[in-house]
Image: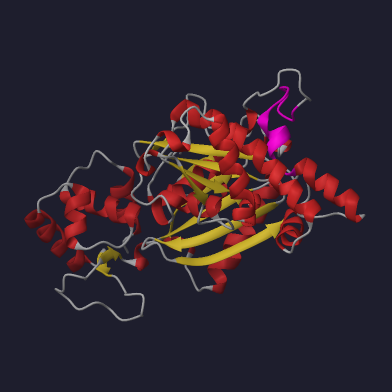
Amino acid sequence: MYGDELNALLADRTVNTPTGRIVRMLSEHGAQSATQIAKLTGLAKSTVSTALSELRKSGMVVEAVAENGREAGVGRPSTRLTLNPEAGTCVGILIGLNHIQVIVADVSHAVLADKTAYVTADYTPAEGVQIARRLVNEAYLEHGLSSESLIGVGIAAAGPVDPRSGRMLRASGIPTWAGIEIPKLFEPVFRRPIFVDNESNCSALAEMMWGDAVGREDFVLFTLDIGVGGAIVSGGRLVRGVAGAGAEFGHIGIDPNGPLCRCGNRGCLELYASFETPLVHASRRFGRSMTVDEVIRLALAGDSGCRRLIEDTADVAGRGLGIIGSTINPPLVLISGVLARAGELMLKPLRASFDRHTLVKRDDVPAESRTEIRISRFLENGPCLGAVGLVLRHQGRLL
Protein backbone atom coordinates (compact mmCIF):
# COMPACT_ATOMS: atom_id res chain seq x y z
CA MET A 1 0.00 0.00 0.00
CA TYR A 2 2.73 2.45 0.95
CA GLY A 3 5.85 0.78 -0.43
CA ASP A 4 6.09 2.49 -3.82
CA GLU A 5 5.37 5.94 -2.39
CA LEU A 6 7.86 5.41 0.44
CA ASN A 7 10.60 4.20 -1.90
CA ALA A 8 10.08 7.20 -4.16
CA LEU A 9 10.37 9.64 -1.26
CA LEU A 10 13.45 7.90 0.15
CA ALA A 11 15.28 7.49 -3.14
CA ASP A 12 14.78 10.94 -4.64
CA ARG A 13 16.49 13.43 -2.37
CA THR A 14 15.78 16.23 -4.84
CA VAL A 15 12.15 16.06 -3.67
CA ASN A 16 12.44 18.84 -1.11
CA THR A 17 8.82 19.02 -0.06
CA PRO A 18 8.07 19.01 3.67
CA THR A 19 6.54 15.55 3.26
CA GLY A 20 9.66 14.17 1.58
CA ARG A 21 11.98 15.68 4.17
CA ILE A 22 9.95 14.34 7.08
CA VAL A 23 9.68 10.83 5.62
CA ARG A 24 13.42 10.66 4.96
CA MET A 25 14.20 11.98 8.43
CA LEU A 26 11.94 9.41 10.12
CA SER A 27 13.47 6.65 8.02
CA GLU A 28 16.95 7.70 9.13
CA HIS A 29 16.27 8.56 12.78
CA GLY A 30 13.24 6.49 13.78
CA ALA A 31 10.48 7.71 16.09
CA GLN A 32 10.60 11.43 16.93
CA SER A 33 8.38 14.06 18.51
CA ALA A 34 7.00 16.90 16.38
CA THR A 35 9.48 19.25 18.01
CA GLN A 36 12.38 16.94 17.17
CA ILE A 37 11.11 16.58 13.61
CA ALA A 38 11.12 20.34 13.19
CA LYS A 39 14.65 20.57 14.57
CA LEU A 40 16.06 17.74 12.46
CA THR A 41 14.40 18.83 9.20
CA GLY A 42 14.86 22.57 9.69
CA LEU A 43 11.19 23.12 8.92
CA ALA A 44 8.94 25.56 10.75
CA LYS A 45 6.73 23.97 13.41
CA SER A 46 3.59 25.08 11.56
CA THR A 47 4.86 23.47 8.35
CA VAL A 48 5.68 20.26 10.22
CA SER A 49 2.22 20.22 11.82
CA THR A 50 0.50 20.53 8.44
CA ALA A 51 2.69 17.90 6.76
CA LEU A 52 2.32 15.46 9.66
CA SER A 53 -1.44 15.85 9.57
CA GLU A 54 -1.41 14.80 5.90
CA LEU A 55 0.99 11.92 6.53
CA ARG A 56 -1.05 10.62 9.46
CA LYS A 57 -4.25 10.88 7.47
CA SER A 58 -2.71 8.83 4.64
CA GLY A 59 -1.44 6.25 7.15
CA MET A 60 2.21 6.72 6.18
CA VAL A 61 3.03 8.05 9.67
CA VAL A 62 1.58 6.68 12.90
CA GLU A 63 2.01 7.22 16.60
CA ALA A 64 4.89 5.19 18.03
CA VAL A 65 4.17 2.57 20.64
CA ALA A 66 5.86 3.39 23.96
CA GLU A 67 8.38 0.96 25.44
CA ASN A 68 5.82 -0.24 27.97
CA GLY A 69 3.55 -1.28 25.10
CA ARG A 70 1.02 1.53 25.58
CA GLU A 71 0.56 4.28 23.04
CA ALA A 72 1.38 7.76 24.20
CA GLY A 73 -1.66 10.02 24.52
CA VAL A 74 -2.52 12.06 21.42
CA GLY A 75 -1.40 15.67 21.71
CA ARG A 76 0.84 15.13 24.70
CA PRO A 77 4.37 16.57 24.43
CA SER A 78 5.83 13.07 24.79
CA THR A 79 3.99 11.75 21.70
CA ARG A 80 6.42 10.36 19.15
CA LEU A 81 5.69 9.63 15.52
CA THR A 82 7.17 7.03 13.22
CA LEU A 83 6.78 5.61 9.76
CA ASN A 84 4.01 3.03 9.66
CA PRO A 85 5.61 -0.40 10.19
CA GLU A 86 3.29 -1.70 7.47
CA ALA A 87 4.89 0.69 4.97
CA GLY A 88 7.79 -1.67 4.36
CA THR A 89 10.53 -3.97 5.53
CA CYS A 90 14.24 -3.96 4.83
CA VAL A 91 16.94 -6.61 4.98
CA GLY A 92 20.54 -6.39 6.16
CA ILE A 93 22.99 -9.09 5.12
CA LEU A 94 26.50 -9.64 6.50
CA ILE A 95 28.86 -11.47 4.15
CA GLY A 96 31.37 -12.63 6.74
CA LEU A 97 34.50 -14.76 6.72
CA ASN A 98 32.82 -17.82 8.21
CA HIS A 99 29.15 -16.93 8.50
CA ILE A 100 26.29 -15.14 6.80
CA GLN A 101 23.88 -13.16 8.94
CA VAL A 102 20.49 -11.72 8.01
CA ILE A 103 18.47 -9.13 9.93
CA VAL A 104 14.96 -8.12 8.91
CA ALA A 105 13.52 -4.84 10.21
CA ASP A 106 10.57 -2.64 9.39
CA VAL A 107 10.72 1.05 8.55
CA SER A 108 9.88 2.03 12.14
CA HIS A 109 13.31 0.55 13.05
CA ALA A 110 11.88 -2.52 14.79
CA VAL A 111 14.03 -5.64 14.33
CA LEU A 112 11.79 -8.53 13.33
CA ALA A 113 14.26 -11.37 12.73
CA ASP A 114 17.96 -12.18 13.15
CA LYS A 115 19.30 -15.38 11.57
CA THR A 116 22.80 -16.76 10.99
CA ALA A 117 24.23 -19.60 8.90
CA TYR A 118 27.83 -20.77 9.25
CA VAL A 119 29.77 -21.45 6.07
CA THR A 120 32.97 -23.21 5.10
CA ALA A 121 36.12 -21.26 4.26
CA ASP A 122 36.31 -19.85 0.74
CA TYR A 123 32.60 -20.29 0.04
CA THR A 124 31.67 -19.00 -3.42
CA PRO A 125 29.60 -15.89 -4.12
CA ALA A 126 26.91 -18.09 -5.68
CA GLU A 127 26.73 -20.14 -2.48
CA GLY A 128 26.66 -17.00 -0.37
CA VAL A 129 23.76 -15.40 -2.21
CA GLN A 130 21.71 -18.59 -2.07
CA ILE A 131 22.28 -18.97 1.67
CA ALA A 132 21.27 -15.34 2.18
CA ARG A 133 18.15 -15.86 0.09
CA ARG A 134 17.23 -18.95 2.13
CA LEU A 135 17.68 -17.10 5.44
CA VAL A 136 15.54 -14.21 4.21
CA ASN A 137 12.80 -16.56 3.00
CA GLU A 138 12.80 -18.38 6.34
CA ALA A 139 12.62 -15.11 8.29
CA TYR A 140 9.68 -13.77 6.25
CA LEU A 141 7.83 -17.09 6.49
CA GLU A 142 8.38 -17.47 10.25
CA HIS A 143 7.11 -13.96 10.97
CA GLY A 144 4.25 -13.93 8.47
CA LEU A 145 5.78 -11.17 6.36
CA SER A 146 5.01 -10.55 2.72
CA SER A 147 7.99 -10.44 0.35
CA GLU A 148 6.20 -7.58 -1.39
CA SER A 149 6.87 -5.41 1.67
CA LEU A 150 10.65 -5.47 1.01
CA ILE A 151 11.91 -2.01 0.01
CA GLY A 152 15.65 -2.70 -0.19
CA VAL A 153 18.60 -4.86 0.80
CA GLY A 154 21.76 -3.64 2.50
CA ILE A 155 24.93 -5.71 2.42
CA ALA A 156 27.92 -5.49 4.77
CA ALA A 157 31.00 -7.01 3.13
CA ALA A 158 34.18 -8.26 4.80
CA GLY A 159 36.52 -6.11 2.74
CA PRO A 160 36.86 -2.72 1.02
CA VAL A 161 34.12 -1.93 -1.50
CA ASP A 162 34.36 0.41 -4.49
CA PRO A 163 31.70 3.06 -3.72
CA ARG A 164 30.88 3.52 -7.40
CA SER A 165 30.40 -0.06 -8.54
CA GLY A 166 30.00 -2.05 -5.33
CA ARG A 167 32.91 -4.25 -6.37
CA MET A 168 34.83 -6.06 -3.65
CA LEU A 169 38.48 -4.95 -3.60
CA ARG A 170 41.39 -6.92 -2.16
CA ALA A 171 39.10 -9.48 -0.53
CA SER A 172 41.95 -11.33 1.18
CA GLY A 173 39.68 -12.62 3.96
CA ILE A 174 37.22 -14.17 1.50
CA PRO A 175 39.34 -14.38 -1.68
CA THR A 176 36.59 -16.01 -3.75
CA TRP A 177 34.72 -12.67 -3.58
CA ALA A 178 37.57 -10.53 -4.96
CA GLY A 179 36.40 -8.52 -7.95
CA ILE A 180 32.73 -9.42 -7.50
CA GLU A 181 30.25 -6.59 -8.12
CA ILE A 182 27.95 -7.34 -5.22
CA PRO A 183 24.88 -5.39 -6.43
CA LYS A 184 24.86 -7.28 -9.73
CA LEU A 185 25.03 -10.55 -7.81
CA PHE A 186 22.15 -9.82 -5.43
CA GLU A 187 19.79 -7.67 -7.51
CA PRO A 188 18.50 -10.49 -9.77
CA VAL A 189 17.66 -12.53 -6.65
CA PHE A 190 15.90 -9.85 -4.58
CA ARG A 191 14.78 -7.46 -7.36
CA ARG A 192 15.01 -4.50 -5.03
CA PRO A 193 17.49 -1.62 -4.60
CA ILE A 194 20.84 -2.94 -3.35
CA PHE A 195 23.08 -1.00 -0.97
CA VAL A 196 26.57 -2.17 -0.03
CA ASP A 197 29.47 -1.06 2.15
CA ASN A 198 32.39 -2.40 4.14
CA GLU A 199 31.41 -4.17 7.37
CA SER A 200 33.26 -1.71 9.63
CA ASN A 201 31.52 1.22 7.94
CA CYS A 202 28.24 -0.57 8.56
CA SER A 203 29.15 -1.06 12.24
CA ALA A 204 29.85 2.66 12.52
CA LEU A 205 26.50 3.43 10.89
CA ALA A 206 24.72 1.22 13.44
CA GLU A 207 26.42 3.14 16.25
CA MET A 208 25.39 6.45 14.66
CA MET A 209 21.76 5.39 14.31
CA TRP A 210 21.11 3.38 17.48
CA GLY A 211 24.29 3.02 19.54
CA ASP A 212 26.90 4.97 21.45
CA ALA A 213 27.54 7.49 18.67
CA VAL A 214 23.99 8.84 18.37
CA GLY A 215 24.34 12.60 17.98
CA ARG A 216 28.12 12.39 17.56
CA GLU A 217 29.44 14.06 14.41
CA ASP A 218 33.03 12.82 14.67
CA PHE A 219 34.33 9.47 15.88
CA VAL A 220 36.43 6.45 14.97
CA LEU A 221 35.40 2.81 15.13
CA PHE A 222 38.36 0.44 15.66
CA THR A 223 37.71 -3.26 15.07
CA LEU A 224 39.86 -5.87 16.82
CA ASP A 225 39.14 -9.43 15.78
CA ILE A 226 40.86 -12.15 13.76
CA GLY A 227 41.36 -9.18 11.45
CA VAL A 228 41.75 -5.47 12.18
CA GLY A 229 39.59 -2.80 10.57
CA GLY A 230 37.72 0.37 11.28
CA ALA A 231 35.76 3.37 10.15
CA ILE A 232 36.08 7.14 10.34
CA VAL A 233 33.07 9.42 10.71
CA SER A 234 33.67 13.13 10.11
CA GLY A 235 30.95 15.75 10.14
CA GLY A 236 28.37 13.00 10.50
CA ARG A 237 29.50 11.26 7.30
CA LEU A 238 31.50 8.10 6.75
CA VAL A 239 34.91 8.69 5.20
CA ARG A 240 35.04 6.02 2.50
CA GLY A 241 37.89 7.34 0.37
CA VAL A 242 38.08 7.60 -3.40
CA ALA A 243 38.27 3.80 -3.88
CA GLY A 244 36.35 2.74 -0.78
CA ALA A 245 39.51 1.86 1.14
CA GLY A 246 39.30 4.59 3.78
CA ALA A 247 39.99 3.56 7.40
CA GLU A 248 41.57 0.19 6.52
CA PHE A 249 43.51 0.48 9.77
CA GLY A 250 44.67 -3.13 9.72
CA HIS A 251 46.84 -2.42 6.71
CA ILE A 252 48.77 0.53 8.06
CA GLY A 253 52.38 -0.48 7.55
CA ILE A 254 54.30 -0.38 10.85
CA ASP A 255 57.30 -2.49 9.80
CA PRO A 256 58.41 -2.47 6.12
CA ASN A 257 60.67 -5.45 6.82
CA GLY A 258 58.02 -7.38 8.72
CA PRO A 259 56.28 -10.60 7.71
CA LEU A 260 54.08 -10.83 4.64
CA CYS A 261 50.45 -9.86 5.25
CA ARG A 262 47.48 -11.55 3.60
CA CYS A 263 46.97 -8.29 1.65
CA GLY A 264 50.36 -8.70 -0.05
CA ASN A 265 52.17 -5.97 1.88
CA ARG A 266 54.66 -6.42 4.71
CA GLY A 267 54.48 -5.49 8.37
CA CYS A 268 50.81 -4.46 8.47
CA LEU A 269 49.25 -3.60 11.84
CA GLU A 270 46.87 -6.55 11.45
CA LEU A 271 49.78 -8.99 11.71
CA TYR A 272 50.50 -7.77 15.24
CA ALA A 273 47.17 -6.44 16.56
CA SER A 274 44.72 -9.11 15.37
CA PHE A 275 44.06 -12.13 17.57
CA GLU A 276 44.98 -14.69 14.93
CA THR A 277 48.53 -15.44 16.14
CA PRO A 278 47.63 -15.35 19.88
CA LEU A 279 44.89 -17.85 19.11
CA VAL A 280 47.47 -20.19 17.57
CA HIS A 281 49.58 -19.90 20.75
CA ALA A 282 46.55 -20.60 22.94
CA SER A 283 45.63 -23.66 20.87
CA ARG A 284 49.14 -25.05 21.20
CA ARG A 285 49.16 -24.43 24.92
CA PHE A 286 45.84 -26.21 25.55
CA GLY A 287 46.39 -28.90 22.95
CA ARG A 288 43.16 -28.21 21.08
CA SER A 289 41.58 -25.64 18.80
CA MET A 290 40.62 -22.55 20.80
CA THR A 291 38.22 -19.71 20.05
CA VAL A 292 38.68 -16.07 21.00
CA ASP A 293 35.70 -16.31 23.33
CA GLU A 294 37.29 -19.25 25.16
CA VAL A 295 40.53 -17.33 25.64
CA ILE A 296 38.61 -14.32 26.95
CA ARG A 297 36.59 -16.48 29.33
CA LEU A 298 39.73 -18.09 30.75
CA ALA A 299 41.47 -14.72 31.03
CA LEU A 300 38.56 -13.21 32.94
CA ALA A 301 38.62 -16.27 35.21
CA GLY A 302 42.24 -15.50 36.09
CA ASP A 303 44.36 -17.55 33.66
CA SER A 304 47.62 -15.56 33.47
CA GLY A 305 48.65 -16.88 30.05
CA CYS A 306 45.37 -15.93 28.43
CA ARG A 307 45.43 -12.55 30.15
CA ARG A 308 48.90 -11.93 28.75
CA LEU A 309 47.79 -12.77 25.20
CA ILE A 310 45.00 -10.21 25.43
CA GLU A 311 47.12 -7.55 27.11
CA ASP A 312 49.97 -7.90 24.60
CA THR A 313 47.56 -7.69 21.67
CA ALA A 314 45.88 -4.63 23.19
CA ASP A 315 49.28 -2.98 23.68
CA VAL A 316 50.13 -3.31 19.99
CA ALA A 317 46.62 -2.26 18.98
CA GLY A 318 47.01 0.86 21.11
CA ARG A 319 50.21 1.69 19.23
CA GLY A 320 48.32 1.48 15.96
CA LEU A 321 45.49 3.52 17.41
CA GLY A 322 48.09 6.10 18.46
CA ILE A 323 48.95 6.60 14.78
CA ILE A 324 45.29 7.22 14.07
CA GLY A 325 45.04 9.53 17.07
CA SER A 326 48.01 11.61 15.92
CA THR A 327 46.50 11.81 12.44
CA ILE A 328 42.93 12.89 13.16
CA ASN A 329 42.74 13.36 16.97
CA PRO A 330 39.17 11.99 17.31
CA PRO A 331 36.98 12.89 20.29
CA LEU A 332 35.61 9.33 20.50
CA VAL A 333 36.93 5.87 19.65
CA LEU A 334 34.58 2.88 19.83
CA ILE A 335 36.25 -0.52 20.01
CA SER A 336 34.37 -3.28 18.23
CA GLY A 337 35.14 -6.86 17.26
CA VAL A 338 35.31 -10.04 19.30
CA LEU A 339 38.30 -8.89 21.37
CA ALA A 340 36.17 -6.04 22.73
CA ARG A 341 34.27 -8.67 24.74
CA ALA A 342 37.25 -8.74 27.11
CA GLY A 343 36.13 -5.32 28.35
CA GLU A 344 38.48 -3.50 30.73
CA LEU A 345 41.02 -6.33 30.55
CA MET A 346 41.64 -5.22 26.97
CA LEU A 347 40.77 -1.54 27.32
CA LYS A 348 43.21 -0.71 30.13
CA PRO A 349 46.43 -1.67 28.26
CA LEU A 350 45.03 -0.31 24.98
CA ARG A 351 44.32 3.10 26.51
CA ALA A 352 47.77 3.20 28.14
CA SER A 353 49.48 2.27 24.87
CA PHE A 354 47.43 4.82 22.95
CA ASP A 355 48.51 7.55 25.35
CA ARG A 356 52.17 6.57 24.96
CA HIS A 357 52.05 6.62 21.18
CA THR A 358 49.82 9.57 20.33
CA LEU A 359 51.04 13.15 20.17
CA VAL A 360 48.75 14.84 22.69
CA LYS A 361 48.92 13.05 26.03
CA ARG A 362 46.05 12.60 28.42
CA ASP A 363 47.54 14.98 31.01
CA ASP A 364 48.20 17.68 28.39
CA VAL A 365 44.56 18.67 28.05
CA PRO A 366 41.40 18.99 30.16
CA ALA A 367 38.95 16.08 30.30
CA GLU A 368 36.67 17.49 27.60
CA SER A 369 39.58 17.57 25.12
CA ARG A 370 40.74 13.99 25.66
CA THR A 371 40.00 11.16 23.25
CA GLU A 372 37.38 8.93 24.86
CA ILE A 373 37.94 5.21 24.22
CA ARG A 374 35.17 2.74 25.05
CA ILE A 375 33.53 -0.47 23.89
CA SER A 376 30.96 -0.17 21.10
CA ARG A 377 27.39 -1.17 21.86
CA PHE A 378 26.81 -3.70 19.10
CA LEU A 379 29.41 -6.44 19.44
CA GLU A 380 27.23 -9.26 18.12
CA ASN A 381 25.38 -7.74 15.20
CA GLY A 382 26.79 -4.27 14.43
CA PRO A 383 27.70 -4.84 10.75
CA CYS A 384 24.36 -6.49 9.92
CA LEU A 385 22.38 -3.79 11.74
CA GLY A 386 24.36 -1.18 9.85
CA ALA A 387 23.43 -2.92 6.59
CA VAL A 388 19.79 -2.39 7.58
CA GLY A 389 20.73 1.25 8.18
CA LEU A 390 22.04 1.53 4.61
CA VAL A 391 18.51 0.84 3.40
CA LEU A 392 16.79 3.13 5.90
CA ARG A 393 19.11 5.94 4.88
CA HIS A 394 19.09 4.97 1.20
CA GLN A 395 22.84 5.40 1.48
CA GLY A 396 25.26 4.13 -1.14
CA ARG A 397 22.57 2.98 -3.59
CA LEU A 398 24.25 1.26 -6.51
CA LEU A 399 21.31 -0.03 -8.57
Q: Split into 4 quadrants, where in the image is the N terminus?
A: bottom left
Which residue is at 10% across, 56% downward? 45
User: Can you give x and y, in whole percent of width and height, for residue 16 in the image?
Assistant: 19, 42
Seen from the viewer's position, the closer of residues 189 and 375 is: 375
Q: Residue furthest front?
A: 363
Asked if residue 302 lies left or right of residue 282, the reply is: left
Which residue is at 70% across, 61% downward? 300
Which residue is at 74% across, 58% downward? 299
Check the image and report above or below for 12 versus 80.
Answer: above
Asked if residue 333 shows in the view, the reply is: yes
Check the image and report above or below for 16 versus 298.
Answer: above
Q: Is residue 299 magenta?
A: no
> Residue 53's quadrant in the figure?
bottom left
Seen from the viewer's position, the closer of residues 395 and 372 is: 372
Q: Main secondary structure of the magenta part?
A: loop
Asked if residue 162 shows in the view, the reply is: no
- What's drawn in magenta, residue-wise? 261-275
